[in-house]
Amino acid sequence: MINLTVNGKSVSVPEGATILDAARKLNVKIPTLCHLENIHKTGSCRICMVEVEGARTLQASCVTPASEGMVVRTNTERVRESRKIMYELILSDHPKDCLSCSRNKSCELQAVGEIIQADESSYEGEKSKEYIDESSPSIVRDAAKCILCRRCVTICNEVQGVGILNAQDRGFASAISAGGKTLLGQAACTNCGQCTVVCPVNALHEKDSTQDVWAALANPAKTVVVQTAPAIRAALGEEFGYEAGTLVTGKMASALRDMGFDHVFDTNFAADLTIIEEGTEFLNRIVGMLYQKGAISAKKIDELGLHRNVNATIPMITSCSPGWIKFIEHYYPGQLGNVSSCKSPHMMLGALAKSYFAEKIGVRPEDMYVVSIMPCTAKKYEITRPEMVNGGVANVDAVLTTRELARMIKEAGINFEKLADGGFDSPLGLSSGAADIFGSTGGVMEAALRTVYELVTGRQLPFDKLHVAPIAGFERIKTAELVIENAKEEWAFLNGVAVKVAVTSGLVGAGILMNEIKDGESLYLFIEVMGCPGGCINGGGQPRPRDEKAKEKRMAALYREDEGKKIRKSHENPDIVKIYEEFLGKPLGHTSHELLHTTYTVRGRHGAAN
Amino acid sequence: MSNNETQCGCCEINENEKFSLLRQTIEKYEAKESNLIQILHMAQAIFGYLPENVLITIADEMNLSMSRIQGVVSFYSLFSTQPKGKHTIKVCLGTACYVRGGSKIVERIKELLEIDVGETTKDMTFSLEVMRCIGACGLAPAIAIDDTVYKRVNPNKLRQILAQYE
Ligand code: SF4
Ligand code: SF4
Ligand code: SF4
Ligand code: FES
C-alpha cells in the first residue's frame, strides 16, 4: 500500500492507483472530463489538475500515480485558476446552445462547469470546426460540440477494434473523424454506437427518430405497433432516476400505451421464435456436417424433416446483433457462410406483425407502422437494409434507442414513476425466461442450449437453475462443452458428440474467433457474438451509465426476470407453439424462410468511400 | 495512376515495382504499428507522396484502419497526400499577414490556380500551402515561392508573380 495525504488527510491506496483514486477514496471531488474509468485514460483535458508538493507544475490527477509520502492539494487558488482557464478554453471553441441541445442536463461538460464555476465573461474564440455529419443512418457527428477528449477514439479502436474514429490533423484544425473526406456513413463503421455512449457531450449521438414516430402516432391512417427489446426493461429506469438494474417492464408497457401506441408487443416473443428457428438451423448444420462425412444417410435426414445440406458450415454463429453483422461483412466476409440466416428478433417480429397479425386485425401491411425500442444504434441501420422488406413493405419502420424512448416519455408529460404496471398485448407479447436473457452476453447461447438439448435428449439442460455458468459474465471469450448422451431414439446418432460453444461480446473478441475460423483452427460448433461489450445491456443506445456497475446490475436484472417466469424455455411458450400451428408451419419451412430469414452482403474493409 | 507520365523522367521503376518495394518495406518493419511513421516515410520516398491507394495498401498489409493511418499522415506536415508541384507557394497567415489580407491572397491564388490549399495544379507546376509565420511581419502580407519571399503582396499583382514561374 502507498500512503499519501490529500488536502491534509492521510490515505492508503494500492500500488498503481492514481491521485484521483486516492482523492475519491477520501470523498474529495476533483472535476474530470476526459477520464473514463476502466476505459479511457490519456490525460488530455487537464481539467483534473492538482498541486503536488515538490513538483514544479500542476499534475493531471487522473494519470499521475500516487506515490509514497506524496502531499497533494486539490483546492488551492492555483488549481482553481488553472482548471478555470482550461475550462474556459474549451468553452471558447464550443457552441453554447445548451437549451436546444439534446444533451442538456445529461452533459458532462455542463456538469463539470458546476464545479468549476467559470466566469460568465469567458471569451468567445474563433470556432475551429462546424459541420454535422448525418450521412450514417445510425450515428450523427456534430463536430462543433466536440471537446477532443478522445474517448470515442479509445472505444472505437481499443475496445471495439474497429478504428473508424481517429484524431486527424493537428493544432487548431485537429478533429475526430473517419479520416480524409470519408463520412461516417461511407466508412466501414459497424454502427455499434459505443462511441455515442462514451461521448461526454453532444458530439456523437444517435440519429433522431422521435419526430418520425410522433408523426406516425399522430396519423389516424396508421396502426402503430411497438415492440421492446429484452435489454430495455433493465435499463430504461435509469433515465428516470432509478438505480441501475431496476426492472421497469410494467411501467414501460404502460408508458407506451399512454403515448398512443395501438399495440404493445414484446421483441422477447421473437427471441423465443429465434431460438426455434436458429436451434433447428443448428441441428440442420450438424446433421449436414455428418452427412458430408457420410456418417448419416439421406434417408435419415428426410425422416428428421431436415434438409440435405451439403454446404453446411460449422461453427454456426448467431446473427441477432446487426453491429456484429456489419462488422463481419466488412472485415471477415469469407466467414459469412457461418452466420445463421435468422433475421434479428425485432425484424422477425416486424415481419410477423405486418403479416400474421395484420391479417388477424384486418389491417393492410402498408397501413401498419412498426416501431422497435432497441438498446442499439445499429438497428437503425439494419431496418434500411434492402433485405428487410417483405411484399414491398419494410419489416420495421423506425427504431428508437432506450435514450430516445426516455426523451419521448418525458416529452409526452408522462409521470413515469407514478405509472401502474401494464402488460404486453397478444399474440406477439408472451415470452419465456429464455428470451429475457437474450439481452445479455451468453444469453442467446444459453437459451438455445435449453431448447436444443431438450429436443435431442428429452431431458432438461443439466445445470443449476438452467444457467450455463461458464458462458455468463463479462470475460472476452467464454467457452463451454456439453456432451450429448442418451439422446432420444431419432437423435441417437448424436450420442457422444461434444457440443463445444464459444461466446464473445465486443468486436475484438469476435475478430479473434473469426481469425480462428479463417485459419481452420476453430474448435467450436456454435458461437454467440454480440457486438457490444457485455451484450445489449450495454448497447450503443442504452442510457449513459451513471454507475460503474451498471452493466453488472442490468445483467443481474435480466437473469432475475428469467428466473421469475414460469416458462423458462422458448419451445414451451404456448404462443410460439400456436404461431407454428396457425401460420408458420414448421421451423425453417417455406413461410419462415420468406419472413424470418435473410442474406448478407460482402463489403470492403475500407467502406464505400475507398 | 493518371499522374504517372507527368512524374519526373528519372525514376525508372514502374508502379508495380514501387508497390512491391512498399510491401518489402512493410515486411522489413514487421508490419508493426509502432513503425508506422518509418513505413510512411519510406512510402513517401518511394512514391513521392502518399496517394490513397498507397495508404490502402499499408492499411491492408498492417491490418490497420484507413482512419488510423490518415490520422498519422495528417498530423505530420512532412507527409503529403498530394503530389508536389515543381514550385511550392506558401502563403503566410501569421497574425500580421492575416490582419493585412493574407486570406484574400489565399483566395486569389485558389481562384487563379483552381486548386485548394494543400493541392497541386493539374500541370504539376504549383502546390499551395499556408503557413503560420514566415518572419516577414513588418512587410505583411507575405508569400514565399520556393525560396523567394514576396512582401507587401497586392492580390492584383499575383498573376504577374506566378507568371514568372510557368
Ligand atoms: S454539448 Fe453540453 S455544453 Fe455543449 S451545448 Fe450541448 S449541453 Fe451545452
Ligand atoms: S459506431 Fe462503433 S464502429 Fe462506428 S465509429 Fe462508433 S464505435 Fe466505431
Ligand atoms: S466526439 Fe465526443 S468522445 Fe469523441 S473526442 Fe469529441 S467529445 Fe470526445
Ligand atoms: S480528466 Fe484528467 S486529464 Fe482529463
Image (cartoon, coloured by chain):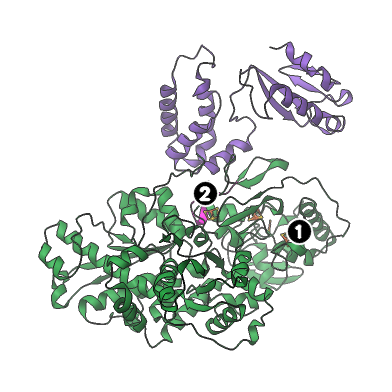
Circle 1 chain: A
How packed mark 1 is, by other alpha carbons closer than 10 Å (few <14, some 14-19, many 20 or more), is few
- Dot 1 lies on which element? loop
User: Hue of chain B?
Assistant: purple
Q: Nearer the viewer, mark 2 or mark 1?
A: 2
- Dot 2 lies on which element? loop
When asked about the image quadrant of residue B143, the answer is top right
Q: Give the residue drawn at x 56%, y 77%.
A: A261
Task: From the viewer's perspective, tell me whether residue A161 is left or right of residue B146.
Answer: left
| Residue type at the position of mark 2 | Gly
Q: Front-most of A547 and B128? A: B128
Q: Which chain is green?
A: A
When asked about the image quadrant of residue B107, the answer is top right
- Magenta residue span: A157-166
C-alpha separation, residue under disc 2 versus residue under disc 1: 40 Å
- Quickly name the residue at label 2: A163
On the image, the x and y values in percent for residue A305 come to 19, 69
Above or below, comparing residue B67 to residue A268 in the picture = above
| Residue type at the position of mark 1 | Glu
User: Which sits earlier in the primary sequence, circle 2 or circle 1?
Assistant: 1
Circle 2 chain: A
Task: From the viewer's perspective, tell me whether residue B89 is left or right of residue A179.
Answer: right
SS majority, magenta: loop
When asked about the image quadrant of residue A295, the answer is bottom left
- Quickly name the residue at label 1: A53
Label 2 CB less than 8 angstroms from ligand 2: yes
